[in-house]
Every structure is written in C-alpha cells, then in structure tokens.
Amino acid sequence: MHRAEILAVAVHQAWCTISQVLGETPVPWDQIPSWRRSALEHTVGFWESWSDYRDLDQPSFLAATHVTWMQYHRRNNWAYSDLTPYVDLQPEQKRKLRAMLDAYVLFRGFFTA
C-alpha cells in the first residue's frame, strides 16, 4: 500500500468507528465501492496540501474540506443524496468529519516523524 492509501484507510476507519457509535452500519474498507475510495483519496490529497496543522482553525478547515468533498462529487455526478453544506450538517456528521481529520493528522505524523 502506498502512503495515500494507508492514510485513506485510517481516515475511513475513523469514519467507521464514529458511524458504529452512532448506531450505523458502515462498510469496511475492503468492501467499499471505487467511487468511495476515490473520494477518500481526494480528501486525503486536499489535507496533504496543508503543511502545518498546529494553528489550524479546525471548524473552518472542516468546512473547507466539506466544500472540496461536495465539489468532487458534483464533478463526478453524485446521485446518492443531496449535497448538504457543512453549516447545515447534523452534529453527528460533523463529528465524523472531525474524527477523520484527527485520524489523518495522527497517522500523517508517522510518515513525517
């Protein structure tokens, strides 16, 4: 596995864990469709473009992440549900995204240490 995929798997696992806590049934990495893998790798790519997370305004960064996610899905003809702006997401959905970013920052540290 290459770096981007390792990070995408870690991010997906964080999403799965929060989903399970919320009573949802997430799909494991080895069973997700290719469009979901591509979307996760796109998100990781966006995060990789930032070099320092220490002084990050996390709510604003999460909102920016969600905008790139929505743009990615619009370009790829998303048809599964409405694309909800970050500000209108339910708190549980925001927690998922925050957990994903936290997992990314943690695992990214293993590559830069």
Image (cartoon, helix red, strand yellow):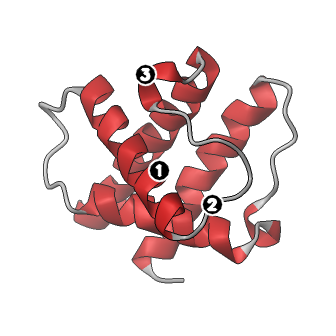
How many neighbours does mark 2 have within 10 angstroms: few (below 14), some (14-19), or many (20 or more)? some
Extreme residue in the bottom direction:
1
Q: Which mark is residue 70?
A: 1
Q: Report the Cα–Cα distance between label 2 and label 1.
A: 9 Å
Q: Amino acid at mark 2?
A: Trp
- Quick one: SS at disc 2? loop
Q: Are marks 2 and 1 in contact (CB under 8 Å)?
A: no
Q: Quarter of the image holding residue 56? A: top left
Task: Indicate the position of residue 62 as horizontal and vertical percent values.
Answer: 36, 35
Instruction: Give left or right: position of 111 versus 29.
Output: left
Q: Is residue 21 above or below residue 44?
A: above
How many neighbours does mark 1 have within 10 angstroms: few (below 14), some (14-19), or many (20 or more)? some
Q: Which residue is mark 2?
A: 78
Instruction: Give left or right: position of 88 versus 12.
Output: left
- Quick one: SS at disc 1? helix
Q: Which mark is residue 87?
A: 3
Q: Report the Cα–Cα distance between label 3 and label 2.
A: 20 Å
Extreme residue in the top direction:
91
Answer whether residue 60 is visible to the viewer in this image.
yes
Q: Are marks 3 and 2 in contact (CB under 8 Å)?
A: no
Task: Indicate the position of residue 44 as horizontal and vertical percent values.
Answer: 40, 61
